Amino acid sequence: MKQGGFLLLLFFFVTLSYTQKNVHYDIEKGIDAVERQYINAWKKVTKVEGFRIQITSFSGVNSKTSIDRVATQFRQQFPDIPYDISYFEPSFRLRVGNYHTKLEAYRALEKIAPVFPGAFVLKDQVDF
């Protein structure tokens, strides 16, 4: 019994002394080139699917002046939220935020809606 315990203890110490210290990965040839292409492709991406809050839209006479006035009011109320004025015929639209999830957009809408009651969340291309 003592010899069996001694052999087990000896086996344990021998195993510890011969453990592998360095790990070597066999990477398939060409994987570096694929990785560089992947990184370069994502560098070109500037917009992704996300959510914005549309504050208002105007069309017709003086619509540009009206949307600029609302944008100035928004910028004064919420200076930390980015906004974007876009023209999609026949109207100008004021959309704010760059939210990657709908939950983020609705949290921001809770702050914005008391000041701009007609605001709503919509799916849009946002900055990456």
Image: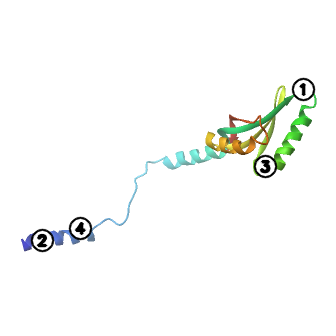
Say whether residue 102 is left or right of residue 54: left
- The amino acid beneath tag 2 is Gly
Spatial CA span between label 1 and label 4: 83 Å
Which of discs 3 and 2 lies nearer the camera? The answer is: 3
**Disc number at residue 60?**
1
Q: Residue 44 location in percent, x, y?
A: 67, 43
> What is the secondary structure assignment of the residue under circle 1?
loop
Spatial CA span between label 4 and label 2: 15 Å
Spatial CA span between label 1 and label 2: 93 Å
Say whether residue 4 is left or right of residue 77: left
> What is the secondary structure assignment of the residue under circle 2?
helix
- The amino acid beneath tag 3 is Phe
- The amino acid beneath tag 1 is Gly
Residue density around tag 2, few if under 14, some if 14–19, many if 20 or more, within 10 Å: few
Which of discs 1 and 2 lies nearer the camera? The answer is: 1
Sequence order check, earlier mark of 3 and 4: 4
Residue at image coords 65%, 40%: 48
Labelled pair 3, 4 in contact (Cβ < 8 Å): no
> What is the secondary structure assignment of the residue under circle 4?
helix
- Residue assigned mark 3: 78
Say whether residue 103 is left or right of residue 59: left
Q: Is residue 101 visible?
A: no
